[in-house]
Image (spheres, rainbow, N blue to C red):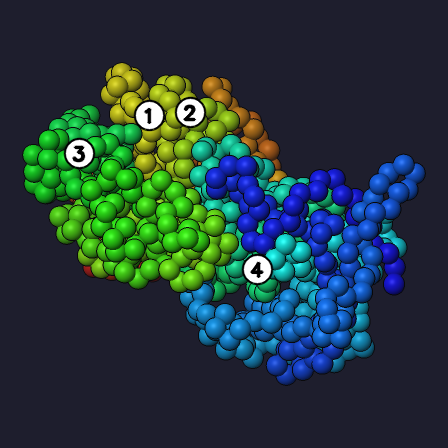
Amino acid sequence: MASFLVAILILVPANAQIQEMGLRNEPVDISDDFRSFKNTYYLADKMVNFDPETGTGEIVYNRYEFKTRMAFNNMLGVLRPVTPNEFPEVEYEVSPTLPFSVQFVSARTVRLQAQSGFVTPEVANRESMMLINNEMPPSDAWKYEKIEGGHRYSSEFGAVVIDENPWRVSFYDEKGKLLTSTNHHVDNVDATYTPILPFSFVRRASDYSRSFSATFNLLPDEKIFGFGEQYTELDKRGQKVVLWVDDANGTQNETSYKPIPFFLSSRGYGMFMHTSSPITCDVGKYFSGANSLMVGDETLDLFVFLGKPKEVLDAYTDVTGKSEMPPLWSFGLWMSRITYFSEEDGRNVADKLRKYEIPCDVIHFDTGWFETDWRCDYQFSESRFDNAGKMIKDLKNQGFHTSLWQLPYFVPQNTLFPEIIDKGLFIKNDKGNLPTEDAILDFSNPEAVSWYQNKLSSLLELGVGAIKVDFGEAAPAKGVYHNGRTGFYEHNLYPLRYNKAVADVTKEVTGDQIMWARSAWAGSQRWPLHWGGDPANTNSAMAATVRGGLSMGLSGFSFWSHDIGGFVLKTPEDVYRRWLPFGLLSSHSRAHGTPPKEPWKYGEDFTDAYRKAVNIRYKLMPYIYAQSKHSAENGLPMMRALFVEYPDDPGAWLVDDQYLFGQDVLVAPMFEKTESRQVYLPGNHKWIDYQSGKVYTSGWHEIEAGEIPVVMLVRDGAVLPHIQLAQSTMQMDWSELELRVFAADAENVQGLICLPFDNQLRRLILESKDNQFRLVENSLEGKAKLSVTVKE
């Protein structure tokens, strides 16, 4: 058997579940466990006992350990086959034979599962919160054939080939193009001097825990996207991505509030790593041809989706759930700062918004609505609020909903702290004590969820419209949870439990599916919506926030927002002006951060500019609402990378500082104080400037921003429904709508419309006759009066 070389650069003590970290909740990077001399490595070698009908078989794993070897004055770590180190020797396999299966979930979706050892029935049968259906009957869309040395399954969208010896699983598209394949050690030993760890699992010496490295080959032209809300370069090839929920403290570093164990490839596939354990993905960083998915779990559960980006996102969200449609009012402007401290503050900002005729739908009270700032006790401060219920009712009469901040951490001085301790509703350490200064609610405990939801329900019954689901990233890594699991599996799952608890009680009490959450995991997209943390007030933070939103949208989330203007300091006026249209041309829009955030605090000229920008969003509300409905039904993001709509345009895969807002509007924010910027226009059609009416061909152009400092263009052949301006979505008249046609060469135009009173998505088709555009069919007859105008 050929030797296998690995250069060891850093040696750290291996561990059982969680390494000794330098700082509390420092992201857990498990990659060091796969290059330690203390551990034992099992390399997938060949498959035996395969049943084509059930897709089940077994893989033989060969045992290796690292040994030292000196070559030309370099000390190398060399993987060598080894004999057992267990006693009695005859009781344990040198090369274990372990279960493997391939399951066909749909015509596009394949599920690969493998085990690294014995799994109890309780663990094997445990339901997953990440899946909307734990029972997945096999799809009959795949046909089987025996091939030389292996097995082939095919559907109308592609094929899966399983080679027996050496064991390899390869994926192909419908035309027979190789998409990716598992990496076997024979692929590497004669092909490169660079040591590569192939598809394998590690057994740690410290505690015998095991984790997989599912290594797949990257093709030369391949690009990788997703992994949740990631702020680094959009294409993740050449990066190491650590999937561990973390308070990122900004939007310009490699940690993430919302890591998602899913990615999609420019080759035509996506992968979902179904686990809540720590994950480290080396996406061609160490070796450009290998994508090493280091999954902390002792079992491997991978879903592979075949197709173009839209098809992959649709298939992925069929498995993990699609976003529900938020209420209409949530699409209006949310006005906030850190923080409004009193009833007077809230009423004052509401009055000023109406005085200056700046449309707005939500007043958000952040950390200051309690008697003691930040000390969350779910009670309005009696010294600051004369009558919170009346205030909420009065604000509603003005067209405003109310949003409230809270968090699931309880400081010792909190009046609720003794009750939480007495009832055992907190996450414990291995002694049964507090692992932190605070009591952190244990959402794996049904009693804790019920207690928590009762606190929120009293506020929602008072008339509160939405709860801000802040934090959730600090569930103790070494904590012991009510369900018996440790933070190794529960830390990343904590946001999912947290999101669900808030979303469920909000919908139960108010009927609306809405929250405003910061942390997330796979499946959180089912409960909108999420926002992007605490960006700095800088141009580079704005650009990174765009990347984070695009990356989030490429991970199954239809709805996403951010703090307009940045969070940390007072926003410089020129940054605020340019950030504002980006924020308003996102699925949801909230001004938030260090005060002032209110436009009148910046002067009359800025207030006028602010009003004009917000007015565009409110006039576009029928377009936004219809596109949101379409996005939610199809697992698509409202803020989407260009290649989602234009996968066959190579240039679209290279752009990370522009986006499509729905299907038809292209947005290029201004990241510096200039008159114009370079913009890439995808597709084989023209684009029309929303503000100026200028027409552009596809490709690169230097385009001037309009009166509102943003480049905003509409696809030739699109019709965008508009509504008469109102100061709140509550005051909008949906009985009269304007269909604004954008046509340069197009003689037929199309768009979508969705009226909020029936939430039925309808297609608009107009044809040009006698130099006028007329509806081919009016499905809104009797529901709304439609007028047609052409953008000039």
What residue sits right under mark 1 in the picture? 594
Residue 329: percent from left, percent from top? 24, 46
Q: Is residue 506 above or below residue 306?
A: above
Q: Provide residue 474's location: percent of width, then percent of height.
A: 42, 44
Say whether disc 3 or disc 4 marks the residue closer to the N-terminus.
4
Q: Residues within 10 Å of mark 1 (few under 14, many from 20)?
A: some
Q: Secondary structure at mark 3?
A: loop
4 or 2: mark nearer the eye? 4
Q: Which residue is mark 3?
A: 371
Distance between the alpha carbons at the discs numbered 4 and 1: 41 Å
Callout 2 secondary element: loop
User: Which sits in the foreground, 154 or 609?
Assistant: 154
Residue 334 lies, in percent from the top left, at 27, 37
Q: Amino acid at mark 1?
A: Thr
Depth check: give the residue in front, 435 or 187: 435
- Are circles 2 and 3 on residues that touch, CB within 8 Å? no
Residue indicated by mark 4: 297
Q: Residue at 22% of width from left, 30% of height from top?
A: 340
Task: Give the foreground label among 2 and 3.
Answer: 3
Mark 2 → mark 3, Cα distance in angstroms: 30 Å
User: Is 343 placed above or below 261 here?
Assistant: above
Asked whether residue 113 appears in the rendered view, the answer is yes
User: Is there a contact, CB below 8 Å, between mark 4 and mark 1?
Assistant: no
Asked if residue 296 is positioned above or below residue 233 in the image, the reply reads below
